[in-house]
Amino acid sequence: MGRISKFFGCPGDRPALHHKAPLIEHDREIVHQLKYNVVRIRHTNLNSSRDTLVSDNESADTVTTLEDDVSLSDASTKLNLADVLLQDDGYINTNMSFTGLKKSYMDKTLDKLVMWAGTQVMFYLMWVILIIWVVIGAVYNAPFNWQVVMQDGQSIQCYFWDTLLTRQQLTSTHEQVLIVTQLRSRIKTFRKFLLGDNDLEKPECSNTVVEEITDGMENNENSKDKQQHVQEDDLVDAQLSSCDDESEKKDNMINKDNKTKVYSIPIDQDAISGALPIENWYVRMSTAFSWMIGSVPAMILFWICIFVWIGCGAVPQDGETFSDNWQMEINTAVAVSLLISSFFLQNIRARHDLFTSQFLLKIHAMDAKIDLILRTANNDFTTENPVVTVDPPKRTKAEHLIDWYADVVGTGIGLVVAICVFAVWAGIGSPLHWSDDWWLIIGTYTGLVGFLDGFVIRQVYFRIINHEEYNFEFLAEEDRQLFQMLSIDCPEEYLSVPVHKRTLNYKVSEFVNLCCSTQWSVLVSVLIIIGLICAASGMLWSTTGQLIANTPTMIIEEFFMIVLIQAHNWADEQRRIEISGLFARRHILLNYVQHRYVNTPSH
């Protein structure tokens, strides 16, 4: 059974992640030149004076001592370590999928499809297809089959897009958590170099992100002997610089209380606000439409249109009320809306992921600078970074089942099932004489499945974004503790995320999002699907029966797409603010390390 589960990608599994930041390869010539300008650290025990480095008003329960430290030489060989690589183009590569297995050829193929689906080319292609369909409808006076083709095409497109979107969400969170884990691994090494801290401490948190296996390292540092080193020279700055596009200003001062204050942080103010950079008209339009679609007014307008359509059903058309054509009209309208919304969502997600990963590249470059200075000062280029373990969040049995289904949708299993279904549908075309009922079958199937997918995607996204958020908060708390122990001032906006104003608009949106994100909402969707299948079966899956099964599912699916776009807008904006805050904190730490350990050369 285990082999079968592994063959299908272990759907539903969420194993603990173990990762240690790899050693950074520094240029030997730069290291050799830097040695003449770096102050050597005296190896002393700082444990006795550690309390003096923590602010007096810090509560006792904020920091707890980690009791179990295990040598990497004993533990790393026992753990299946996950690797993460930031490419120069901003894309993130991992050796393991979110289910804990090494990525297969199918995984890599699907990841490429996810990237491809969010490109500008695909966005243009969507509009070309839509315009061609509108022109054909105008020429042939919008026949019944013309509407069915749009519904079938859109249902099939959303069926595959649900697979790509599910995978994009799960993979993005998996990558971000691994990036945070790598930064946590490296910041612990910095902390040991700066504080001689072998007894690692961790912040007290309410969730289960448990700690790490750390290697032993010699205690080293004497903070009182370092106040004299306050500036870095142009030569070393040029040698260390790997963020060529950032002008690093050195406005730091060290006052008589040995407290470093940073007055100037070279950081993009648009990034701090959480806004995506506007590069051209296409980006401006895409961003504007995503916020328009994912808003409370859009939700209200959507339901107004639905109730107007219901009222129009009572008006006789060709002597018939609530006719098949009446249902087809709303199905077609919703199909067009779903087509546009799904492309917008995929595009916005792709742009957000690329933006954050490129920002992370700059953070990684600053980490490399800090690592070079500290390892040179300690004359230690071999001690490995500690392993950090991130446990998965706790799940109920229902949530485990939901994750199992989400993984089936987001892996190759879903594609195999889809191909089989489409093959069967094509095979029964001739016996059904390619009738209207035959055309509606595939739309009905993909519509019902897409209806369930909408609930599952929203519920899974709610949980994984909370898990991702917790890991970023954990990293910020570790940075805060290090800054307090080093008496470094850091603006509060770089350590916390601004809270949304509790406006009526926000409260309504939050309530709707929470209602749509519970495990019970998924159960309700399953019950609705069972009821619709029973109703359609009682009508022998006629055109009317299939439309009854199709219409409410498409309406609710579109509403969930609006809710999902809004949730993505909020979460993505918050993540960009957190990433920019992380960038600022690393810049502050880099300035501190440079001013503390790098001497001004004699000329």
Image (tube, helix red, strand yellow):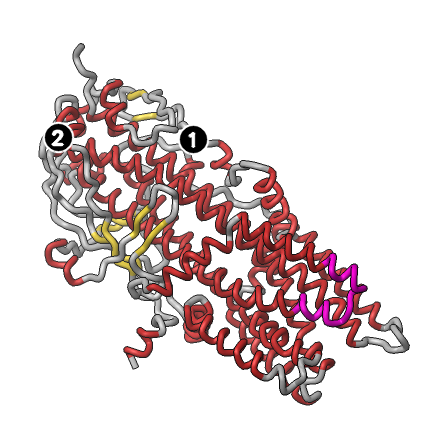
Q: Secondary structure of the magenta portion, mostly?
A: helix
Measured as percent of width and height from the top left, residue 166 is found at: 47, 63
291 shown above or below 452:
above
Residue assigned mark 1: 267
Q: Residue at x 33, y 35 (%)?
A: 586
Q: Residue 415 location, x and y as percent?
A: 46, 70
Q: Is residue 496 visible?
A: yes
Which element is circle 2 on? loop
The quadrant in which residue 18 appears is bottom left
Task: Tell me: residue 500, above or below residue 454.
Answer: above
Residue at x-position 15% and y-position 40%:
47
**Within-10-Å neighbours for mark 1: few <14, some 14–19, many 20+:** some
Is residue 452 found left or right of 35 in the rendered image? right
Give the residues drawn in magenta, as a range. Answer: 134-151
The reply to whether the magenta stretch includes residue 146 is yes
Rendered-image quadrant of the N terminus: bottom left
